[in-house]
Amino acid sequence: ETGVTQSPTHLIKTRGQQVTLRCSSQSGHNTVSWYQQALGQGPQFIFQYYREEENGRGNFPPRFSGLQFPNYSSELNVNALELDDSALYLCASSLGQGSTTEAFFGQGTRLTVV
Amino acid sequence: AQSVTQLDSQVPVFEEAPVELRCNYSSSVSVYLFWYVQYPNQGLQLLLKYLSGSTLVKGINGFEAEFNKSQTSFHLRKPSVHISDTAEYFCAVTGTDSWGKLQFGAGTQVVVTP
């Protein structure tokens, strides 16, 4: 079991609403990456935060935004939810910038948009 | 940019039989390669990774993979599977200049039957 925790584990939102997902990174890790995993697909990279700054972004619209705090925990915010946003959202924490140590994944947040 | 193709969406296999999961990648830069396993309703667990050095990589739970640069492949093998190996397996790649920003394949579902 990793030290990466995500909350909540499940939630249901209505189309058009906004949602905030949270990730507590492994102790000592300064980098958090977020992924979206739609049903039956592989995870897709959303963005990465390194020491509170965005450090790369995948092919996701601006309504997906994030934040990293001084303790390196992170939030993923999604505005104007669409049905296709229904997915498992995974965060992974790691040591960034020149380190090649393992990235540890949390258990994920299952978001259902109705 | 990198991409990953997992050639089999589902692999049925009998208990104690060998299994091979195929993964091909494309990249314009040098890469790091990974295999992850995902059990139902859980996050991702790292099985093994190739960073450099020996092209034969050994991981947890008896899995191994071979990096073949000329064929741009990173196939995963296990000589004898157990029922508990039933899971989804993901191959992932990241460029050596983009640590932590993983590109995943679509996954291979392994179903082990007695």
Image (cartoon, rainbow, N blue to C red):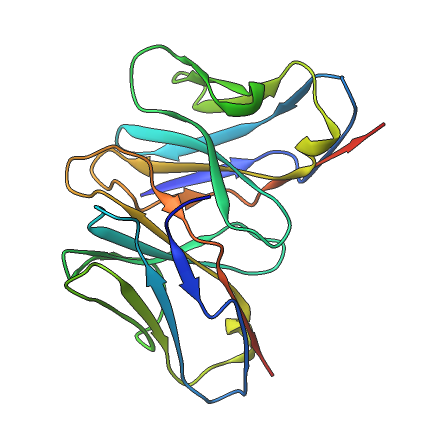
Does residue B2 lie above or below A87 as drawn? above
The quadrant holding residue A53 is: bottom left
Does residue A54 lie above or below A101 as drawn? below
Q: Is residue A13 visible?
A: yes
* Residue A57, horizontal then vertical, whole percent: 27, 59
Q: Is residue A41 left or right of residue A61?
A: right
Q: Is residue A76 left or right of residue A15?
A: left
Query: Which one is nearer the viewer's eye here, A33 or B93?
Result: A33
Residue at 56% of width from left, 45% of height from top? B106
Q: Is residue A91 left or right of residue B11?
A: left
Query: Which one is nearer the viewer's eye here, B30 or B34?
Result: B34
Question: How many marks can you see?
Answer: 0
Residue at 58% of width from left, 27% of height from top? B22
Residue at 51% of width from left, 50% of height from top? B43
* Residue A83, horizontal then vertical, whole percent: 56, 78
Q: Is residue B114 left or right of residue B31?
A: right
* Residue A109, horizontal then vertical, whole percent: 49, 65
Does residue A68 lie above or below B57 as drawn? below
Quarter holding the C terminus of chain A is: bottom right
The quadrant holding residue B49 is: top left
* Residue A30, horizontal then vertical, whole percent: 19, 50
